[in-house]
Each structure stands twice: as structure tokens, then as C-alpha cells.
């Protein structure tokens, strides 16, 4: 009797008929939007909205009248582009950008060079204690930036640093690391120490994914380990190099922790040493959120332009090489 | 599949709700709007340690009787709190009561964040020195805060090392310079002290002692005189000592500074009444070897000091119960029991004059056990505090000080040029904001 209950498809008036094809299609079309909803809502609430508000603030300013005491003495008014022209004409912001440029010229090549070198060394067959070495190089990345800067800051202070003690005992010259040119080296050192491990892991992971046949073919062709490294490994990890370079540029433009942490230890780091420190100082030291917002927008745009320019250049090069 | 979507949606909804909840929790959750009827609960932002214990005395005593309950919310100190108060005020959610340094009061008043509590504090005025009280009125008829603690400046030195090097305690700044030179000759590796550019309050206090009035008002206009003759004198004096190399130029409060104090590489410190606490942390090994003397004077026979630090209790304009809040502020800073507790729990030096010689201050601080009359002397010195004059952008002036004088101290260059930068930047900022500035 059970068979009698079953009805073949297409029988008119079937109570369990499938929904019409159009409904299915509509549901299928709306599904992606439904999945996107949570991310979109969060993006709008916590990303787009604050950015929009910052842009709005950057076009406003506070106008004080008279002595500025008592209620109603302060009004928020439209400023037009004034905050932007002020920021671009502010020598401190430009100087800060130049200082960061100098700092980046040391940090990025040294850090990525070391990361690549370590990754290649770890990837070579002859290395011993590879897991331990890998961890040891990576470990500084796990230390929070502020803590790292404090640790190094204390090591840079002649009166408390064990290094200076040793130099003193050996009768060697004791350079002042928290002044002038050496200050850039001192700051870069903290960034390199903390960042090399992360970049090394990125490059190393990409080295590991190169298929063994490639090496085998190279060896059969008589390539030495150095040739393999230079002509096979490095070109094949180029995308990760581009990626790490990209991250490093952004991190450099946003440098804040290291100089801010070293600031109380020396007279050489001003409160506006890097562009982000200037933004922070204007917003929270001088209480001018409007100027700070304009500067933040400028820095964000500069970062965006630089990043895209770099990515485009890198892509074009890769395409050219692929075409060759 | 549908389950995953739903749970993710639920998760994100919770995230959004949590975010909103946190935002709402930032403000005070004071709902009753009726003034002084029924129980009142107030929020108090302060950085003084142990303040909750002092407030407990209020909540169990007079507060219970008057049905005014105060809750302490511990905050970061100084400028950080000013920024936070202003941000909260912008949202209309500032707490009822706040702790504020004297130099921050004009900034807060200028942002319309502080309520006028002159009516409720009329009786309190007589308990304070005029110079202290005047800082809370900003020269108007209004009263914007009740003074809590003060920081009269003094000269601290290593008694044992002064004896060892055959130095006399300087009574004038000329003698101070001579002492620094004499010490450098006797022991080239030792400095009398350092000129530190990382705490603007020290320089402001020294300028105040010399008679500087950085911000004053003339009718409807501000007058900024940061580079006046008195301040120039102070800047030249210290710039000269740094250039000569007889005092150090490194900042205070660093591990290196701690070590210098601990090992006798620096043997004196121009500081304020709160120094024992700082020295106890910075140089615990030299406890009992220090002594306190009045600040050196600009001319012989004078008796003036500046002040470095000190704060007040203010009521915000966002408070629904300003009268109740003002009542608490007055009690906290004038009542005998409260002041005793403040001295004991928070370690402050009270602004109320009669409290400076009360029971809590009969014995010297532990670090200065060798100087039995520490607090008698301190109360004497406090009386000689020169009046101060703060303006609406002290924060800008202070930041410029740190950068300009930091650079000048590092390069051992002209301090007066740094002072002019400080003046120019401060005036430029005021004009940019729209303040009327007399020139």
C-alpha cells in the first residue's frame, strides 16, 4: 500500500509539488546578499561611518569668541579646506614625513633582506636545528611593540645599559644612540628586531610550497645551491616579497609606538616626530580634533596612493616577466 | 547551511549590541533629573590613589544623611583626563565631579564643561590662601572648583654629599649657580641637578616664582606674556648653566635619572612638596640622606616660591545635581575628617591651610625621617606661593615647551629663542581658535 502514496513528478494538483522555478531563482539571487549582510553592517558601522565622521570633522573647526569663557563662547563652524591647507603648509608634518622616509629607507631594505636571507638559509638542506632557529627568529614578533621599544630604550641609555658597561670596560667609544643620525639606527633596530621574524615566516612558507620537481630538474641541469637560490627560489617567492614589502611600507608610514615610547627617555624625539604622532598630539594634546582629522585623511590618502602605485608597478613587472 | 547563516547573524547582532552597550556604558547612568529631591547618585572621575576609601567616609556619614551617594571612577592623571572629560562633555555624558589640575581649569571652562558653584562654596573660600582660591575663579565672580592639593616648590638636596663636597645650601639662584660650578670643579662626574624639558610644570613654577604672569585678561582680550622679562630671566639662567655644562641636560623620570639620584651622580632636585613620594620610588637606596630647604630666591631676603602641580575638584555642566555635587566637593576639601583621610590614603598635600598643620602632618614623611620639622617648614613655604595665571591653551604652551626646550637642552643652545617659540606658538594657536589676543 505504501507505493500508492508515492506520486510521480509532474502530476497536477500534487500536494508536495516543488516551488516554481522563478522562486528558486529569486532565492538563489538574494542568498549572496543575505550572506554579505553581517559583514556589510559591521563594515558600515565600525569602518565606513567613523571614516565618514572623520572626513566630516576635517571640514569643521571651532570658533571661539572674545575671552572664550562661559557658555556659548565656542561654536563649531564650517572650515572649508582650511584644515587641509594648514596641514599641508605645516612644516612639522612635512618634516615628520621626511623623518619617517629616512627611517623607512633603513628599516624596509634591512628587514626584508634579513628575512629573505634567513628564509633561504632555513630552506637549504644543510641547516641544523631548523625548527629552533625558526622559532628564535620569529619570537621577537610575539613581543608587543611598546614592550620591545621599552626594552631597547633601556639598553640605549648609557647609564643603565649593560652594553655601555662592556664598552666602557673595554675602553671603546660609547656612541649616543638617542641623538641625531644614530637615533634613526636605534629606532630602525627595534623595528627590524621585531619585524624580521614575521616576514621571514611569510617568505619561508612560500619557499616550502615550491614543488620538489623544480629543484630536481635544476639539479639535473647542474645548478649549484647558490644558483638555485638566486634563479629559482627568489623569482618564485617574488609574490610574497611584494606582499611583505607592501606591509612594511604601510607599517613604516604608521610608525608610532617606537618613537612615542622612546620620547620620555631623550630630548631628541619631539612630540611630532612622525606624522601619526603629530595627529595624536593635535587631537589629544592640543585638543584640536578637526586639524587632526584633516591630517589623518591626508596620511590615509598618501598611504593609499603609495600602496596602489607600488602594487601596480609590481604587477606590471610580473606580467612583463611572464610574457618574456 | 541555514544554521550557519543564522548563527553568524546572531553573532554579529550580539557584536553590534555589545558595541552599543559599551558606548552607552561610557557615560554616567544617571537617570533622575529632578534636582535635590530623593536620593542622588553622583559619579566622580579622579586619579588620586585611595580616593574610594575617602569617598566611603562620605557615603557612610554626611552623604547618607543627605542621601547623596558618590561613586569613584579611577582615571589616568592630568592632561589625559582633561581630554577625556572634554570628549565626554561633547556627548553630554561627563561625570558629575572631576579632578582637574589648576592649569586645566581655563581650558575646561572655555569648553563650557565646568559649572559655576559660587553659591554652594561661599563658606569654603576662607579655608584657602588667596593665591590658591584665585586659581578657581579665573578672575571672575564665578567659582569653578574647590582646591584640593597644592604643590609649593622646594629645594631638595643630599645632606651627606653636600657636606662631603663642602657645599652650602644655596639661598639665592646666584648661589645655586656657584654651588653647581663648585661641585663640577670638585667632582667633574657629578652634577648638582639636571634641567629637564619633559615636565613643563617645573618651568612654569620657576617662572611663577620669578613673577611671571603668563596669561592675563584685559577687558575682552587675553594677554599672553610667556616671554616676559621674568620668564626670560629664568630661561637665561638655566640655559647658561646647561651651556656651561655645570648641570645635566637629560630628562627626569628615566631609569638613567633614577640611577643618577641613587648613586649620587646628581645630588639635588628642584621639586615640590610631593617629592618624598617620587624620591622614594626613584631613589629608594638614599632614604634618610636627603633634606629639604626653601627654593633659592632671585634676590636676597626675598621669600617667594612657585607651585608645581596641585589639583582641584570641579562640578561639570552635565551634572543633573550640581548643588549636591558642589556640597560633596566642599566637604571633601574642607572637612577635617576628609582631609585627614586624603592625606593618609591619597598622600596629598592639602590646599586647605589649617589642614597643613593638622594631625596628619605632625610627623615628617617616612623618607625624610631625619627632618622632623618637614611639614612645619612646608606649611611656612606654602604661604609664600606666588599667584599663578593660567590661560585657555596651557596644553599647547606645555607641548611647545617640551619640544622647544628639549631641543635647546640637547643642543645646549639659546633658551630664550626656545621661550620665544613657546610664546609665538601659544599666541598663534589662540588666534587660530578665535580668542581675542592683545598684542
Image (cartoon, rainbow, N blue to C red):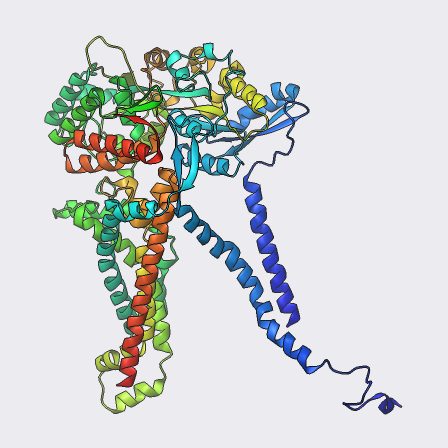
Q: Quadrant of residue A119?
A: bottom left
User: Residue B33's spot in the image, x, y percent?
Assistant: 64, 30
Label tally: 0
Residue B155 visible in the snapshot: no
Measuring from the top left, give residue A33's x and y in whole percent. Answer: 58, 69
Query: Is A197 in front, or is B112?
Result: B112
Determine if residue A153 is in view. Answer: yes
In depth, the one of B207 and A181 nearer the eye is B207
The quadrant of the picture occupied by the N terminus of chain B is bottom right
Give the residue at the far right of this rendering: A1
Towards the viewer: A39 or A66: A66
Q: Is residue B359 above or below residue A165?
A: above
Q: Quadrant of residue A135?
A: bottom left
Q: Residue at x 15, y 47 (%)?
A: A175
Image coords of residue B16 (percent x, y)? 58, 54
Would residue B149 be found to the left or right of residue B155 on screen? right
Q: Residue at x 50, y 25 (%)?
A: B115
Q: Position of residue B62 (x, y in %)?
A: 61, 18
- Position of the C terminus of chain B, as image quadrant, is top left
> Which residue does the image show at 82% across and 89% down from the upper left?
A6
Whether A12 is drawn above or below A240: the answer is below
Q: Is residue B189 above or below residue A270?
A: above
Amino acid at each position: 500500500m505504501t507505493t500508492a502514496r508515492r506520486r510521480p513528478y509532474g502530476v497536477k494538483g500534487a500536494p508536495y509539488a516543488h516551488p516554481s522555478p522563478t522562486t528558486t531563482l529569486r532565492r538563489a539571487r538574494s542568498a549572496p546578499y543575505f550572506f554579505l549582510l553581517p559583514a556589510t553592517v559591521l563594515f558600515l558601522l565600525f569602518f565606513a561611518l567613523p571614516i565618514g565622521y572623520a572626513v566630516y570633522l576635517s571640514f569643521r573647526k571651532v570658533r571661539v569668541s572674545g575671552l572664550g569663557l562661559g557658555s556659548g563662547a565656542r561654536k563649531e563652524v564650517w572650515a572649508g579646506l582650511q584644515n587641509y591647507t594648514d596641514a599641508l603648509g605645516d612644516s612639522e608634518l612635512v618634516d615628520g614625513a621626511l623623518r619617517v622616509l629616512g627611517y623607512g629607507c633603513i628599516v624596509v631594505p634591512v628587514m626584508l633582506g634579513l628575512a629573505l636571507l634567513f628564509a633561504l638559509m632555513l630552506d637549504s638542506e644543510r641547516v641544523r636545528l631548523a625548527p629552533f632557529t625558526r622559532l628564535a627568529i620569529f619570537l621577537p614578533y610575539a613581543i608587543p611593540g611598546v614592550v620591545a621599544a621599552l626594552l631597547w630604550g633601556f639598553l640605549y641609555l648609557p647609564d643603565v645599559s649593560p652594553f655601555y658597561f662592556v664598552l666602557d670596560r673595554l675602553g671603546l667609544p660609547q656612541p649616543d644612540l638617542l641623538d641625531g643620525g644614530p637615533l634613526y639606527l636605534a629606532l630602525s633596530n627595534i623595528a627590524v628586531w621585531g619585524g624580521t621574524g614575521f616576514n621571514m615566516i611569510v617568505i619561508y612558507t612560500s619557499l616550502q610550497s615550491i614543488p620538489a620537481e623544480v629543484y630536481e630538474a635544476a639539479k639535473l641541469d647542474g645548478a649549484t645551491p647558490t644558483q638555485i637560490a638566486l634563479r629559482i627560489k627568489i623569482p618564485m617567492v617574488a609574490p610574497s616579497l611584494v606582499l611583505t614589502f607592501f606591509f612594511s611600507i604601510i607599517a613604516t608610514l604608521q610608525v608610532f609606538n617606537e618613537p612615542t615610547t622612546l620620547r620620555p627617555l631623550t630630548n631628541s624625539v619631539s612630540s611630532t616626530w612622525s606624522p601619526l604622532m603629530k595627529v595624536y598630539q593635535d587631537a589629544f594634546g592640543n585638543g584640536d580634533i578637526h586639524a587632526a582629522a584633516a591630517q589623518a585623511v591626508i596620511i590615509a590618502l598618501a598611504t593609499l596612493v603609495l600602496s596602489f602605485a607600488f602594487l601596480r608597478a609590481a604587477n606590471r613587472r610580473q606580467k612583463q616577466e611572464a610574457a618574456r | 547551511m541555514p544554521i550557519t547563516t543564522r548563527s553568524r547573524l546572531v553573532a554579529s547582532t550580539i557584536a553590534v549590541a555589545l558595541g552599543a552597550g559599551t558606548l552607552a556604558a561610557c557615560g554616567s547612568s544617571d537617570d533622575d533629573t529632578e534636582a535635590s529631591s530623593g536620593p542622588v547618585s553622583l559619579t566622580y572621575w579622579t586619579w588620586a590613589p585611595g580616593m574610594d576609601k575617602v569617598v566611603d567616609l562620605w557615603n557612610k556619614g554626611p552623604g547618607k544623611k543627605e542621601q547623596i551617594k558618590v561613586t569613584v571612577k579611577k582615571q589616568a592623571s592630568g592632561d589625559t583626563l582633561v581630554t577625556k572629560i572634554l570628549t565626554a562633555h561633547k556627548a553630554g555624558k561627563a561625570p558629575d565631579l572631576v579632578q582637574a589640575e589648576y592649569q586645566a581649569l581655563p581650558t575646561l571652562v572655555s569648553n563650557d564643561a565646568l559649572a559655576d558653584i559660587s553659591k554652594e562654596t561661599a563658606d569654603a573660600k576662607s579655608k584657602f590662601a588667596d593665591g590658591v582660591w584665585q586659581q578657581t575663579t579665573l578672575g571672575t565672580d564665578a567659582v569653578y572648583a574647590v582646591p584640593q592639593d597644592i604643590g609649593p616648590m622646594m629645594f631638595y638636596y643630599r645632606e651627606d654629599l653636600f657636606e662631603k663636597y663642602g657645599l652650602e645650601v644655596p639661598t639665592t639662584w646666584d648661589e645655586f649657580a656657584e654651588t653647581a660650578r663648585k661641585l663640577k670643579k670638585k667632582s667633574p662626574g657629578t652634577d648638582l641637578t639636571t634641567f629637564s624639558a619633559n615636565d613643563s610644570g617645573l618651568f612654569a613654577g620657576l617662572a611663577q616664582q620669578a613673577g611671571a604672569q603668563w596669561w592675563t585678561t584685559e577687558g575682552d582680550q587675553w594677554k599672553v606674556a610667556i616671554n616676559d622679562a621674568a620668564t626670560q630671566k629664568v630661561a637665561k639662567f638655566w640655559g647658561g648653566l646647561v651651556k656651561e655644562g655645570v648641570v645635566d641636560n637629560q630628562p627626569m623620570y628615566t631609569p638613567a635619572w633614577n640611577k643618577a639620584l641613587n648613586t649620587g651622580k646628581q645630588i639635588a632636585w628642584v621639586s615640590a612638596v610631593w617629592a618624598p613620594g617620587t624620591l622614594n620610588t626613584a631613589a629608594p637606596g638614599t632614604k634618610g640622606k636627603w633634606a629639604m630647604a626653601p627654593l633659592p630666591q632671585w634676590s636676597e631676603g626675598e621669600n617667594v616660591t612657585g607651585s608645581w602641580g596641585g589639583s582641584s575638584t570641579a562640578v561639570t555642566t552635565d551634572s543633573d545635581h550640581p548643588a549636591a555635587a558642589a556640597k560633596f566637593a566642599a566637604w571633601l576639601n574642607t572637612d577635617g575628617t576628609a582631609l585627614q583621610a586624603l592625606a593618609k590614603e591619597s598622600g596629598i598635600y592639602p590646599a586647605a591651610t589649617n589642614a597643613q598643620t593638622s594631625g596628619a602632618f605632625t610627623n615628617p614623611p617616612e623618607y625624610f625621617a631625619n627632618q622632623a620639622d618637614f611639614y612645619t617648614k612646608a606649611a611656612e613655604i606654602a604661604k609664600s606661593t606666588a599667584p599663578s595665571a593660567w590661560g585657555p591653551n596651557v596644553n599647547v604652551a606645555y607641548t611647545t615647551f617640551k619640544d622647544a626646550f628639549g631641543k635647546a637642552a640637547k643642543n645646549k643652545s639659546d633658551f630664550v629663542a626656545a621661550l620665544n617659540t613657546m610664546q609665538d606658538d601659544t599666541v598663534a594657536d589662540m588666534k587660530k581658535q578665535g580668542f581675542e589676543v592683545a598684542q
